[in-house]
Amino acid sequence: MHLINADLHSHSTVSDGTLAPEALAARARAKGVALWSLTDHDSLAGQARAREAAIAQGIGYLSGIELSAGFIGRSVHVVGLGFDADDERLIEGVRSIREGRLGRARRIGEALAAAGLPGTYEGALRMAGDAELVARTHFARHLVEVGHFADVHEVFRHVLADGKPGHVPHTWATLREAVGWISAAGGIAVLAHPARYRFTPTEEYALFTEFTGVGGRGVEVLSGSHSVPEQVVYAEMALEFGLLASRGSDFHAPGESRTELGALPVLPGRLTPVWEALADRVQRG
Ligand code: AMP
Ligand code: MN
Ligand code: MN
Ligand code: MN
């Protein structure tokens, strides 16, 4: 179980990925993934398709989602795994988070226009296409397409990251709500890519304390967003806080994502993989 190639964090066209759930399932299998989860932002719309596609590809599937939550005025992400995707409270909670995104996108568009980049709200909606929601990724892709920036990472660095002109404040779910909905639906809440938040050590300690205090049970130790030293840091944090360890590429798009599906190293042996605790929730053909 420890050595299984699990990739429990990825995005499809339902949120801000560029591959449909079926194409992602096929790519996961081709890249050697044996246990997969589609964790679209704030949407469950891809779950049935992902599960069926995974079963058709002969790989294991865990239900998944990545919820946007607020902590001390900043955004953090909570990955939910192995929950009942038909749970009414979860569905309603997810809808409530998603609902605020359109107004936020309009405010991002206004902020970017004030910074000399007009028309991005319309551009982002075009990039979102049939997605269930609009994300900053869609703004980034639009700004690359019209030639303002070389790649999406440049756009984030210059205008979309926290503290940059296109970053607007937004109220997401609370950590307690996000973790609570996932847990009540029978799933495990996992703190996503903790290194990405760039918290001070004190803030990070507070985040882990709050997260475990409200029922969070796992942390992404291996993430496409983590450097090798950061993997070591969060392996230690998992042990210190008694958290299960997860592994996820956070794959969004070929040619854009730096970490391929299934490409992360194996989890350090002294950690307990989150998928061991979810063995009875894995769906197979
Ligand atoms: P949102 O949920 O609308 O705030 O958008 C967050 C998404 O933006 C993340 O899930 C990533 O897909 C993307 N993102 C955030 N930071 C970066 C970055 N530095 N480079 C590339 N993509 C990023
Ligand atoms: Mn994303
Ligand atoms: Mn994330
Ligand atoms: Mn993600």
Image (tube, helix red, strand yellow):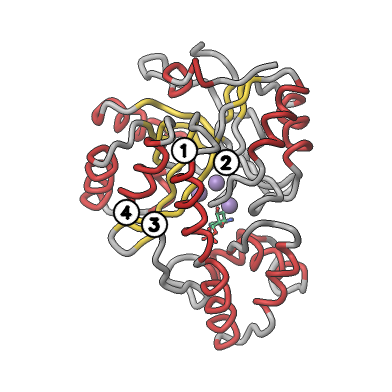
Where is residue 271 drawn, in percent x and y?
37, 19
Q: Where residue 80 is drawn, which disc sits there?
A: 1
Where is residue 153 drawn, in percent x and y?
61, 59
In the rendered image, the vertical position of residue 110 relative to residue 86, given as above or below: below
- Per the image, label 1 sits on a secondary structure element best described as strand
Residue that mark 3 sits on: 173
Q: CA distance from mark 1 to mark 3?
A: 14 Å
Where is residue 233 drawn, in percent x and y?
34, 34
Q: Tag 1: residue type?
A: Gly
Q: Tag 2: residue type?
A: Thr
Choose top left, top right, bottom left or bottom right for residue 124. Answer: bottom right
Q: Pointer 2 and pointer 1: residues touching (CB < 8 Å)?
A: yes
Choose top left, top right, bottom left or bottom right for residue 193. Answer: top left
Q: CA distance from mark 2 to mark 3?
A: 17 Å
Q: CA distance from mark 2 to mark 1?
A: 8 Å
Q: Tag 3: residue type?
A: Ala
Answer left or right for 84 relative to 186: right
Q: Earlier in the sequence, mark 1 or mark 3?
A: 1
Circle 1 packing at 10 Å, graded few (<14), some (14-19), many (20+), is many
Q: Nearer the viewer, mark 4 or mark 3?
A: 3
